[in-house]
Amino acid sequence: MKYNMFKLGTYAAAAALLLAGCKGGPSSDFSTDQASGVQYRFFKQATGGTKAELGGVARVTMIGKNSKDSIIYNSTKQGGDSLGTFRIPLKKSFNGCLEQGIALMSVGDSAEFKINADSLYLVTFRMHKLPPFVAAGSAIRFSIKLVSFETEKQAADERQQMMAKRMADMQTRKAAEPAAIAKYLADNKITAKPTEDSLFFLMRGGKPGKAIKDGDSIYVKYTLMMLDNTVLETSDHGPGHDSFPLQYSKNMSLIKGWVEALSTMHDGEKVRILVPSSLAYGPQGSRTIMPYTPLIFDMEITKLVPAKK
C-alpha cells in the first residue's frame, strides 16, 4: 500500500505518514520522564544548545521506524524542506506526546521517543478510530534531531517579519505593473488604447460570424502567456480537445478580462488581449501566477451554439 506525502510544515501532517504497521513494546533502554510520561533515550546531548520548551516552535529532522526496525519515513528524503527539516509547534496534546519529548531536548541533541499510537490518532489527529493498519496499544518510534528552536515570541516576530516582507513585495509588484505594461506596448510598437476597464485588444482577426449572446454555448481555443511570451497554459489537450467549452454569461465564474473580451466577440473571431491584474488574478495571484501580474491571452471562438429560445 502506498501513502501520499503532503509537504506541510507541521509535525501532525508529516507524522501521520509514519504510523503504518508500527508496533513496539517496552524497552529496557528507554527512560520515562516522570512529569510527562514520555519514553525517551538520548543518542547525543549537546552542550550549550538552546533548551526547547512547550509553546515554542522546533525545527527537526525525523526518522520513523516500525517494530522490525525498518525505516518507514525519513524527513531528509520525504516531506522536509531543502535541508530535510520541518517545523513542529510544541503544543501538548496528551501526556506522553512527541511535543513533550522534544521539549526535553536542547538544540543539537539527538534522541528517540516512543509514542502511543492510540493517543496520537485519537487525540492529536482527532480521528474517530484507529486505521486498520495500526494495532491498538502499538507504538511509533521517532528518531529526532533538534536543529533549531524559537520561543513563542520569536516565532510570532518571525511571522510578522515575513508578513511585512510579503506586503512590501506586493506593493513593489503593484507599483511596477503599469511600467511593465507600458514597456510591453512600446517594445512591440502597439498603439491600441485600453477599454474603460483598462483591457487592451492588441489584435482582432479571423472571420467573425454571429455575435456571442447570453446563454450561447461557445468553444474557446486559447493560449495564456506572460508579457515575456512565456506560455503558462493552453486549451490544447489533444485531438478533439483543443478548445475550452463554456456557456457564456455576463456572470460567468471567469476572470473579468475574459468576460469582457467575450462580450465583444463573434463566432470564428480571434483576438489577442492584454489583461491587467485588476481584470485577472489581482493581488491574490494563483497557483502559477504571482500577484499583480498582467497577462496576454490569444483567444479564438471555434464554435458557437446559439441558446435555445
Image (spheres, helix red, strand yellow):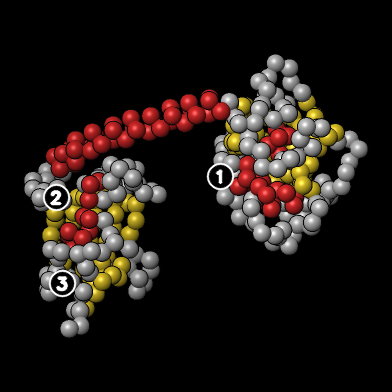
- As helix, strand or loop, the secondary structure at mark 2 comes to loop
Residue matched to label 3:
213
Q: Quadrant of the C terminus?
A: bottom left
Residue sitting at x 34%, y 56%: 233
Mark 1 and mark 3 in contact (Cβ < 8 Å)?
A: no
Residue 197, label in figure? 2
Q: Which of pointers 3 and 2 lies earlier in the amino acid sequence?
A: 2
Mark 2 and mark 1 in contact (Cβ < 8 Å)?
A: no
- Residue type at tag 3: Lys
Where does the image place residue 137, in percent across and percent down from the top left? Answer: 81, 53
Q: Which of pointers 3 and 1 lies earlier in the amino acid sequence?
A: 1
96 is higher (above) or lower (below) than 234: above
- Residue type at tag 1: Leu
Q: Which of pointers 1 and 2 lies earlier in the amino acid sequence?
A: 1
Residue matched to label 1:
8
* Farthest residue, direction top: 48
